[in-house]
Image (cartoon, grey):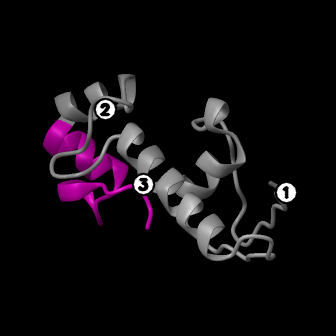
Amino acid sequence: MELDFGCWDGLTYEEIERLDRDRLWAWHDDPWRVSPPGGETLALLAARVESFVKEIGRKHDGSTVLLVAHGGPLRWLIDPAAFQSVRLAPGEVHVRNR
């Protein structure tokens, strides 16, 4: 699952800016602690993704696993330190060895 955008889900950036400008800019300035209304912060996304990866590791220890996901979780897995600057093309493939 992608980052949970809560009430913003399905809206364009322009619609969110028009309807909820202050919250949008607060989220833009600190997405680690501020979430979209009813959504999740980047900190919550990170915890969810890390928990999932650990579960997959336990269930499939020593196996090769193919993970298909949305951009947010994949950007976290590729480089948590550069999460917001990682760019992915649709269908892009990354190989990660643990």
Front residue of 96/90: it is 96
Where 58 falls versus 98 (above or below)?
below
> Closer to the N terminus: mark 1 or mark 2?
2
- Which secondary structure lies at badge 3? helix
Q: What residue did someone put label 1 on?
A: 97
Q: What residue did someone put label 3 on?
A: 48
Image spot of residue 75 (x, y percent): 63, 49
In-image side of 32 versus 20 (left or right): right
Q: What residue did someone put label 2 on?
A: 27
Is residue 69 rendered magenta in the image? no
Q: Residues within 10 Å of mark 3 (few under 14, many from 20)?
A: some
**Real-space Cα separation, disc 1 to disc 2, in angstroms:** 33 Å
At 53% across and 51% down in the image, what residue appears? 50
Front residue of 66/35: it is 66
Image spot of residue 45 (x, y percent): 42, 49
- Dot 3 and dot 1 residues touching (CB under 8 Å): no
